[in-house]
Amino acid sequence: MGSVGTAAVRDGGAALPHGFWAAVRVWLEKPQVANRRLCGAAIEAEGPVPLGEGGGASPRVAAVWGGGSGGMQEGGAASAGAPELGRLWREVCGQLPAGHGHLPPPLTPWAGPGRRPELRAVLRTLLPRGRPVGPAAPPTKELAVQDVYNGTVTFLPLEENSEGKYQIKKCNIYQIQLKHVKEEEWSVSIVTPFPEDWFSDGIAYPKLAWLGNELVSKLAKWSVEQKPSEFKSTLSLISVAKYSKVYQELKEKYKEMVKVWPEVTDPEKFVYEDVAIATYLLILWEEERKEKGLTKKQSFVDLGCGNGLLVHILNNEGHSGRGIDVRRRKIWDMYGPETHLEESAVVPGDSHLFPDTDWLIGNHSDELTPWIPVIAARSSYSCCYFVLPCCFFDFHGKYSRRQSKKTQYREYLDFVAQVGFVCGFHVEEDCLRIPSTKRVSLIGKNRTYPPTERALIDKQITQYINKRQTCTMVTCDRRVGLNHKEHSDGVCKETGSELLENETEIAATIWMPGFQPREKVEQIRNCASLPRDFVDDVVLNVANLLLNRPPEKSCSNTYGGNTNTWNQGESLSLKEVAEHLNKETLKRLKSEYGGLQTLLKNNHQVFEVLNGRVHIRDWRKEKPSRKTKPEVKRRLSAEAFKTRLCWFFIHHPDGCSLPSESCPYAHGTEELRQSQIIKKKKHI
């Protein structure tokens, strides 16, 4: 029996053995968090399987069966695919080399007093990530046999023969073990019966060294640090296997969008994020058609569609629908007439209902996010919604936190979910697999009430919206006759008769007068729109302020064999710098987001702002570009080389700290190159 690797675990908080099984569950259900060459695993069947009598066990390990976490309770016996799992187990258990010294002794029944000898089996399919070139690797089936009583889980790779029966690929059998050493000391280890025959495909089965180092250390860490997540598992509402297949197909189909992206936003992030969201919706809608017996593909409206790529993909994949946004984007012209996009402001009210639409989409829809469940509920009884909240907005403006015990993101998700419940939806939550920190979606596709109660639910919605307004407004809203109420933990306290008993109805056309959609012309307030001469004056004034102070130290410059001193100047706090600028300059900067700090950071050639202090940048200390830098960034750096004049060469009393051949900026107009980036944008 070959030991692959062992990690010692100290458990001072009574996390084990419960935490070990929670860690095993992560490896079973989400192997991609450890093995980045996988995109997930599909659990196809799970349940108890019988084994012969006998076998002892450690009481400390067996104690988990009496209760705990990790999805290992006996109540899970009524699991999915039990008959199929039993048939498969009968097929493969005779192939096990047990009794010949090949498998470790713990692969024995965990039968305690009054229990039948059973193991618990999980049939899973490992799903590989798509390759940059060549066809995707085929999925791999595996039977994981959990012996909870003895603290082991054995992984049996399966291969299908020509007769359609499964055989164990014995060379790649491995087992994860938990052992109690003494008191608070435990160990997590991985063993394999045939280490000399191990076959690594580099995807589902990495090298044994990876299992013995990376995987063992992660399992040991998860076993004692496992904390309940405040979010659902990724892709918990759809098939991971189907998602992986469709995502790779769509990614290949729309990858050319990255090369022609005309917006200033990062093309790789936005293209692949919208491809992932489209994949999720397509699978979700396919499942809905099966559940409800529908043949026609669902229609949709994307409110606040932005660049419109999600609409473009869904239209191309056969779903009729349109996107609405207050501001037209450059990329809209590239899609063609088949993609339906409208430039219009959406103001929640009777004029923006969609009775003939199946789904409303809110993908980072900002101020419209809490309104989308309301619009869906009032559009029709069959209208559903999908929202992916990002920025925090209430019905009437920015969302105000009310519960310090939760993160702001979790609290906001709970608020948007509560809106859905009030609107009469069964609200489901799921995490998407997208390159974003805000990736939790909320879905309302089923109602909690019969159609005859729509009027009652509509009144409930109106009362809830007005209650939210009174809970956050300091002054009374005299238009609807509401008084400000105290609030505690997000719930208004009644101070008289029942709230809104005799309330004035909200205007029929607009549900909340005063609602402000985004402005059609996006205001640029990051100092980028300030006049160039104004910026240059501020930069020169601040630089002279730093340079004319006694320097903290002089740094030697030994380029070219000559030893000189180059004035680095003094560092000052942002407050000290601001005190030396005139009132008119400060007033102008305050109208910009970030003000003085943003302007100085924008001029990173001259300044370095660290921990609230401003320094003159010394380019000799800049780290050279790492070889691992992404190809796109390396190309952009090369294209920008010598396309701007060196500020230090022109303005610094000692000139530039770097020689001309090392400085990324031009030492004089004769060195200037035309920017290739600008040329490319004009060509697009």
Image (spheres, grey):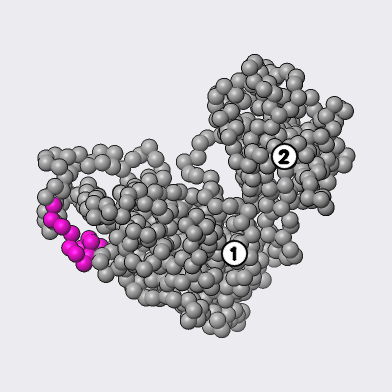
x and y, in percent, of residue 355 in the image? 33, 66
In the rendered structure, are the residues bearing label 1 and label 2 in contact, judged by CB atoms less than 8 Å apart?
no
x and y, in percent, of residue 607 in the image? 49, 61
Residue shown at 46% from the left, 65% from the top:
298
Q: Is residue 209 above or below residue 625?
A: above
Residue under numbered circle 2? 87
Pointer 1: residues within 10 angstroms few (<14), some, or many (20+)? many
Q: Is residue 449 above or below residue 219?
A: below
The amino acid type, in three-letter code, at marker 2 is Arg
**Image quadrant where one finds the N terminus:** top right
Q: In which quarter of the image is residue 138?
A: bottom right
Residue 91 lies in the magenta stretch: no
User: 643 or 243: which is nearer to us?
Assistant: 243
Q: Is residue 239 above or below residue 268?
A: above
Main secondary structure found in the magenta portion: loop
Say if residue 81 shows up in the picture.
yes
Residue shown at 60% from the left, 32% from the top:
77
Q: Is mark 1 on a helix, strand or loop?
A: loop
Earlier in the chain: of badge 1 and badge 2, it is: 2
Q: Is residue 11 above or below residue 568?
A: above
The amino acid type, in three-letter code, at marker 1 is Ser
Q: Is mark 2 on a helix, strand or loop?
A: helix
x and y, in percent, of residue 317 in the image? 54, 70
* Left/right of residue 354 with respect to residue 130 in the rendered view: left
Q: Quadrant of residue 577?
A: bottom left
Magenta segment: 503-515
The mark lying in front, picked from 1 and 2, is 2
The disc at residue 657 is 1
Q: How far apart are marks 1 and 2 (CA)?
A: 75 Å
Residue shown at 46% from the left, 61% from the top:
601
